[in-house]
Amino acid sequence: MSILKPAAALVLAVLALAVMQRTAPGYADITRPITVSGKLGERLTGRQFDIRVESVRLGRDLVYEAYGRRQTLTTNGVWALLEVSAEATTESVSIIAASWRAPNGARYVASKRPSTYPGMLSLQRLEPGLPKRGFILFELPRDQLAGGTVLIARTEFAPLDTEFAFHMDGIDTLPLQGELVLTADD
Amino acid sequence: MTERAAALAPISAGARRTRRLSLLALPFVVALALVVHSWETALEWWRVSDLVERRVEAGQSASYAGADWRLLRSTRVVDRPDGSAVVLVEFEAVIRDPDAFARLPCTIALADAEGRRWLPSFMRPRELRGLQRNVAIPETCGSVSLTRPQAGTRVEIAESFVLPKESLAEAQPMVSLAAGRPYFLRFEELGVGE
């Protein structure tokens, strides 16, 4: 009886320490971005800017004009073109980090292939009081569209900063265009 | 003495005093540990933040971060179709301490009463041509600092901004240099009108 009590206390203490060790968050978890979630068409507000994904178009080829030349970009998968409006809230800011979190867990970083097209959101500077429209483009496998989530942040590594998560529900039901044409009006 | 008896034995007055002192000291020790661990981070935050404003009246100059600063002029260069205006803000700086002046980063911004800040933006070449005077590509604060001007030198610094037309009336230029932080200068008048 006299040994049982301290032994039980020791086992409990060891168990508690093991649980604490297993569940202690790492540095990356402690400083991870703060997620603000929403869906297509919803305006979300973060620390430095607010943003809305207004529409999505899908296509096999991407066609645009830059410096007087028509450019065509092909893909083995699908182009997903997001039209976005955004506005800085407190200070001029650029948004350079966007990725597609696929249902299989993979992350697809926004395509930089049409790097000369000035309408891309990553090439624009957001100013307080001046809402802007721009595009974010993803090159994705067809089977990773449904259930995908678009993650948008100011930078690739944004500790304790806002990361927007837009759930792309119903995107797989959108029509797949042969040519996705970006025009100056876009 | 059995174990139970030992456990129930009265605690000595000395041990009670030690325990009480330890408990009293605990909050101070925890606070001290926090200070020791976060001291360098707090100091770094203090050095890089714009925390204390020094107002400069219209037409006056102010000594700050190794130079005497004066707002020369603000020019509304052009209005854009999206409701924004491009503004060129020009300063004069007479260098007093070259080392302090050359310490980067240097930030010039426009700020309004709500705390919104517009950072320098590139002006399109055709907008620069819209200025009705002969202006070379403006020397920015960063590029002037990199030339390490000597004491007594007078330099002109210009930055361009894009901001909503309705914000022109209350936007004020601010200057913040590494050697001057946490202080920063806020010039009282932009003077380009709405």
Image: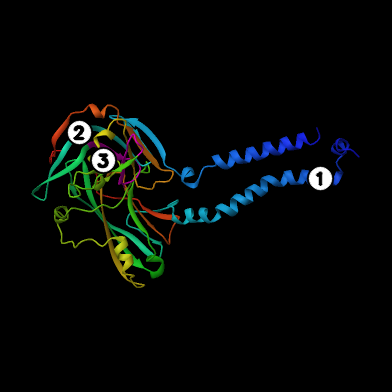
Label 2 residue SS: strand
Residue A15 relative to residue A30: left or right: right
Front residue (pair B72, A100): A100
Residue underneath mark 3: A130
Front residue (pair B19, A137): A137
The chain letter for the residue carrying disc 3 is A
Q: Position of residue B40 (x, y in %)?
A: 53, 56
Q: Which mark is residue A57?
A: 2
- Quarter that holds the N terminus of chain B: top right
Q: Position of residue A4 (x, y in %)?
A: 76, 34
Front residue (pair B160, A146): A146
Residue underneath mark 1: B17
Badge 2 crowding class, 10 Å Cα cut-off, few under 14, some 14 to 19, many 20 or more, is some
The chain letter for the residue carrying disc 1 is B
Instruction: Find residue B54 and report its image quarter.
Output: bottom left
Q: What are the residue bounds of the magenta stretch? A: A81-105
**Residue A98: in magenta span:** yes
Marks 3 & 1 on one chain: no
The answer for how far apart the CA atoms under marks 3 and 1 are is 66 Å
Q: Is residue B32 above or below residue A7?
A: below
Q: Is residue A29 above or below residue A177?
A: below
The chain letter for the residue carrying disc 2 is A
Q: Amino acid under label 1? A: Arg
Image marks 3 and 2: residues in contact by CB distance under 8 Å: no
**Residue A173: in magenta span:** no
Residue B97 seen anywhere in this rendered image of the structure = no
